[in-house]
Image (cartoon, helix red, strand yellow):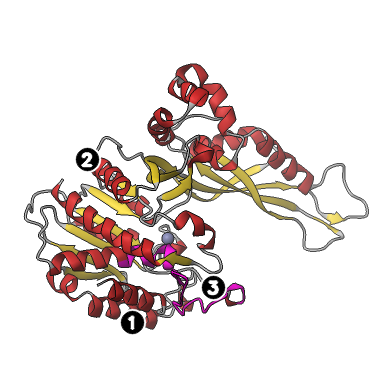
Amino acid sequence: MSQSAVRHLQAAIQTPTVSYPDRSRMDFGVFERFLNDLKANYPMTFSKGTVERVAGYSLVIHIQGHQSDADPVAFMGHYDVVPVKPEGWDTDPFGAEIKEGYLYGRGTLDMKGQVMATLEAMEQLLSEGAEFDRSIYLLFGHNEETGSEMSDSGAALTRDLLRSRGIHFYAVVDEGGAVVEGKTLGIDGLVGLVGIAEKGYLDLRLSANQVGGHASMPPQRSALYDVFEGAMTMESKKFNLSFNEATQAMFSVLAPRMKGLRRFVFTHLRWFKPFVLNELAKSPQTAALVRTTSVMTMALGSKAPNVLAQTGEVIVNCRLVPGDSVDQVVARTKAKVGPKVNVDVLTGTEPTDVSPVDHPAFVILQRSIQSLYPSLTLVAPYLVVGATDSRVYHGMADGVYRIQPFPNSYLDRGTVHADNERILIDDYLKGIELFRALLLELSKA
Ligand SMILES: [Zn+2]
């Protein structure tokens, strides 16, 4: 069984389903091949399930449960991958080579490993005659890596289709969790993190105008001076620190497991809040959990070294904590940068709401992960600072939860979207066990 599971993952890695924002660069023949392989490798799932395709290549498999009136459970994923720069790799990025217990290749961690582990688990259960109470949806997108904001996003169009059918999910499970070393969070050992919310995303264009002309007779202030002055003010006066609901939920699980003074401080946040927030703000990882961040990422002036810019431009990327909003950040930015600087929104997405941690689905996830992975000191909720496709299901589910099913993946997190991406084969096999448990337990909850 486990050999065929590894072979299936190898075949998936060997099928280079690379997605690009420019869709004309995507080789959809490869995506077709990927889907055909799934059908061949998971015959029970494809025959017992109702299979649909959305937006051409996103897959919807519906496994009917006994309780047709109960809200279904969704297991999501995406099978597209980001492009590779083969020069940096020690193996063929699409070779699926096995070395020293690892399987190498683009997509092993992000996230064909999780997609295939879900399918293996479902196929095993159906072959054993397992039945489900709640219906299960397997939802696998084909263009997550380019974002759910694009008009042909498989995840967003799948959500639209299911919503038009009046479906509300009991729980949605996706990628986006993490296993981290607990040190930065004040915990000894490893912590499993389950994402319960995602930050918002906002690109702002700051600009200032001045008369152009030759740089040999410059005015008092150039356009770039004005825009940088505004942008520097924004960087130096950072947005306020606060405990949003998701970070609050995380620390209420972590605090009782901390040691000594730290534990006292974190369990008495009503006294120590300003102190704790300032401490958290010192490291980029924890600062991102307690504030809306902003950072300059691009700048533009004139097209020649000796020509004054008529317009100076700085792009600022912001990530919004739950409770904040695009409008509020724009208003606060305008106040910081002053009247000389224009503020335009290039693209903006609101933060998600926060999924409940007292919901049975969260409790099942927490308990299943903890019991299968004793190497974790504990499993806690957290705020996802990036974005996954699962954000489209907020508002259409009791809870949307993002997990990391591979307990040793923290060692190789740096290979995601980078060189030598790999998964420990033992982790992959354990992930299948985890999904077996989750499919059964969430369906019965
Ligand atoms: Zn991913």
**Front-most of residues 226 and 239:** 239
Q: Amino acid at mark 3?
A: Val
Span of residues in magenta: 87-116
Q: Is residue 445 magenta?
A: no
- Mark 1, residue position: 33
Percent position of residue 184, x then y: 54, 39
Q: Is residue 102 magenta?
A: yes
Q: Amino acid at mark 2?
A: Pro
Q: Amino acid at mark 1?
A: Arg
Q: Earlier in the sequence, mark 3 or mark 2?
A: 3
Which residue appears at 56% of the width and 45% of the height?
A: 318
Q: Give the left or right position of residue 157, taking residue 263 as reference.
A: left
- Mark 2, residue position: 360
- Mark 3, residue position: 84
Quarter that holds the C terminus: top left
Residue 102 occupies quadrant: bottom left
Q: Secondary structure at mark 1?
A: helix
Q: Give the left or right position of residue 432, taking residue 188 as reference.
A: left
> Is residue 362 among what the camera can see?
yes
Q: Secondary structure at mark 2?
A: helix
